[in-house]
Amino acid sequence: MKSPAGHRGRRVHRLPFRADRFATAAALASAAAGPYMVYENDGTVCWAEGAKATVTARGGGAVLDVGGERREFEPGSSPLDAVGEALDALPYSGWRAYGWLSFELSHALHLPEPVPPATPVAHLTVPRWEIRLGPDVAELRADDDAGLNALRERLARAIRDGAAGPAPERVAVDADGHDADAYRKAVGEALREIGAGRLEKVILSRTVPVDGGLDLPATYLAGRRGNSPARSFLLRLGGWEAAGFSPEIVVRVTADGWVATQPLAGTRAFEGDAAADAARRRELYRDAKEVYEHAISVRLAAEELGEVCEPGTVRVRDFMSVKERGSVQHLASELSGRLRPGAGPWDALARLFPAVTVSGIPKAAACELIRRHEGTDRGLYGGAVLTADADGTIDAALVLRTVFRRGGRTWLRAGAGIVAQSSPGRELEETREKLRSVSRFLVPAGGAS
């Protein structure tokens, strides 16, 4: 592809930064005129706006758009092959792309029927402007000095605007009762299919509508202060708006070829009462259903890593510890391995997607059951929000504990892992516990002080 005008190397400027990273990022997002994404990863909160280039993927492949010049890529073994090829064809170096993968990508990876051509499964952008907020330094990225000067002004304004924080008002939702009877019935039907031997585990979810307008940046800030996620994100990108507090990563691939994944399965409430939370933590380790659900999830993650990693390199680095994630605590493990020769970061993501903790075992049977019982596309729920860098680094967060807005609707969604030992009442209660990680922090539009 011929490089369009204006695609020279990025200019980078660093300056001291002592403000609240999350409040500043939320203020930057609130003032954004175009598509944007905020992504928190290991102490750095990145804000990105605009689109120098866009990669979109559907069942029929991917399209790269750079300055209105479009190029199509065939899907290969999966749409992610086409996404990787499109990003490799970018006409500049040192890029970072921000974006999302929808749960429906799982259909292309695991089901025999093709994804409908109009169904989007991936959307990534290389932004025009970036600010990366670390604990002590802000790093500004733009194409020229004029862009850097504009970013300095925007950052200073965001620091001032972010100092106030969100107002205390909240939007109420019926997280406990909405669709509860239908969900219990769906769990019962899934248990019958598990009993018939069709699968070992499946995650079914339920949706809770949110009435009234929300201030999503203020909701993100309030929710981030009340959660301890593995990753957090806030976006208006590719037709979706969302604010989320991801409990786990789908995959992390480093530039030197190390792959990690972090399945969380097994849940109890975490409510801030030290004695009660400790008792529930002990209960997690004693509960045969929760331990079994976690163990089979780790087993599948190890098998999937083994298909893309060098023999003998797959390791369970942390097995069945407990991670506190907002209003819940989970059994958690971390696995890693080194990519085998010939396998790339998109191969690793394709093999591990969707996370076992939002699909089931085996994945093909679980995805088919999910599609049949839930009746509608999940969209971002159960998919991934990610960054991808020119050096081969990928960091993909699982989209859970999220408020979604699309097509004039706003909603929450949560699911539970169903295995043979499950009970419909307990799985319903698990969805309630997870929903509270977000439902307590919904800030009404106009509610930021």
Image (cartoon, rainbow, N blue to C red):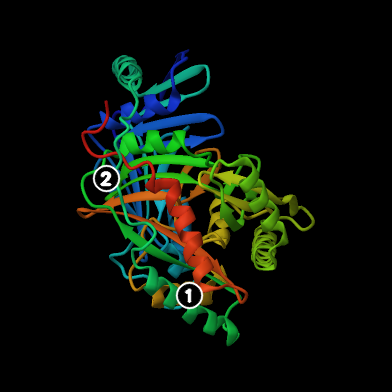
For disc 1, the neighbor class at 10 Å (few under 14, some 14 to 19, many from 20) is many
Spot occupied by residue 104 in the image (x, y as percentages of width and height): 40, 64
The answer to which of marks 1 and 2 sits earlier in the sequence is 2
Three-letter amino acid code of the residue under disc 1: Val
The residue located at (44%, 73%) in the rendering is 184
Quadrant in which the C terminus is drawn: top left
Against 374, residue 261 (above or below) is above
Q: What residue is shown with label 2?
A: 69
Looking at the image, which is closer to me, 150 or 62?
150
Q: Quadrant of residue 24?
A: top left
Spot occupied by residue 66 in the image (x, y as percentages of width and height): 30, 42
User: Residue 187 shows which numbered tag?
Assistant: 1
Q: Is residue 307 left or right of residue 74?
A: right
Q: Is residue 313 left or right of residue 49?
A: right
Q: Is residue 3 visible?
A: no
Give me the C-alpha separation between circle 1 and circle 2: 48 Å
Count the marks: how many?
Answer: 2
Spot occupied by residue 112 in the image (x, y as percentages of width and height): 46, 78
Q: Secondary structure at mark 2?
A: strand
Quadrant in which the N terminus is drawn: top left
Three-letter amino acid code of the residue under disc 2: Glu
Q: Secondary structure at mark 1?
A: helix
Q: Is residue 136 left or right of residue 28?
A: right
Against 130, residue 370 (above or below) is below
Looking at the image, which is closer to me, 126 or 279?
279
Q: Are marks 1 and 2 in contact (CB under 8 Å)?
A: no
Against 366, residue 97 (above or below) is above
Looking at the image, which is closer to me, 74 or 83?
83
Q: Quadrant of residue 148?
A: top left
